[in-house]
Image (cartoon, rainbow, N blue to C red):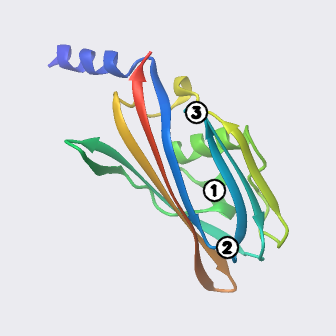
Amino acid sequence: MKLIFVLFLISVVNAKIIIQKWEIQSDPKFAELKYEVKDGKSMSIDVHCLNDADDIMIKAAAYSKVDGVFNPFVAPDPIHICKVHEHEDPLVKFMHEEILKFGNVTKACSLKKGTYLYMHDFVVDETKFPVPLPEGEFRVDVNATIIDGGAHTHAYYSELFFKTVKE
């Protein structure tokens, strides 16, 4: 049993993340956005908010591909952008801290019309990732809902496909 565990640990050490595809659908009434993946290594997004919002609720889920099918393996509770700094999940904290290094993702609430958010050349530092990822293919889905005056409006959906390989 110990040998199997050691072999598993060896398989996740020095894993490199390669971004394969990033697809985004957004409500054009909420924001204008541009996004790109560069050389499978980094991601950039520019968002120009077209309406006010009291908060944004994010629902994310991660999937791993097994026998050709993506199966869920992580689905944290919804995250309110205005309270993300209070979140206790180590994966959420890690991702928030990493994203802040590459952009101006807001800490201020509420979001005002005309707010410009960006994240440029975001690269996940695999050496700091709090959860070891084995070699394989993965997908992360993100849904964003605008909360304004009690109304909830779906504004954004994305799918990020990536794989991990040994270096």
Circle 2 Cα neighbour tier, 10 Å, few/some/many (<14 / 14–19 / ≥20): few
Front label number (1 vs 3):
3
Query: Residue 70: percent from the left, percent from the top?
Result: 29, 49
Task: Tell me the residue that label 3 is attached to.
Answer: 124
Q: Earlier in the sequence, mark 1 or mark 3?
A: 1
Give the quadrant of residue 47: bottom right
Q: Quadrant of the C terminus?
A: top left
Residue 55 seen by the camera: yes
Dot 3 or dot 2, earlier in sequence = 2
Task: Determine whether the residue tagged by mark 1 lies in a helix, strand or loop.
Answer: helix
Q: Separation of disc 1 and disc 3 at Cα?
A: 19 Å
Foreground of the two, 13 or 87: 13
- Of labels 3 and 2, the one closer to you: 2
Pointer 1 residue: 84
Marks 1 and 2, how far apart in space?
25 Å
Residue assigned mark 2: 28
Q: Residue at x 70, y 55 (%)?
A: 34
> Which image quarter is the N terminus in?
top left
Task: Give the image location of residue 143, x and y in percent.
Answer: 52, 64
Q: Could you tell me which residue is drawn at 67 percent across and 73 percent down?
A: 28
Q: Secondary structure at mark 3?
A: loop
- Badge 3 local density, few (<14 within 10 Å), some, or many (20+)? some
Mark 1 / mark 2, whichever is N-terminal: 2
The amino acid type, in three-letter code, at marker 1 is Val
Residue drawn at the location 58% of the way across and 33% of the way down: 124
Labels 3 and 2 touching (C-beta < 8 A): no
Residue closest to the eye, 63 or 26: 26
The answer to whether 130 appears left or right of 83 in the picture is: left
Q: Looking at the image, can residue 89 be seen? A: no
Is there CB contact under 8 Å for labels 1 and 3?
no
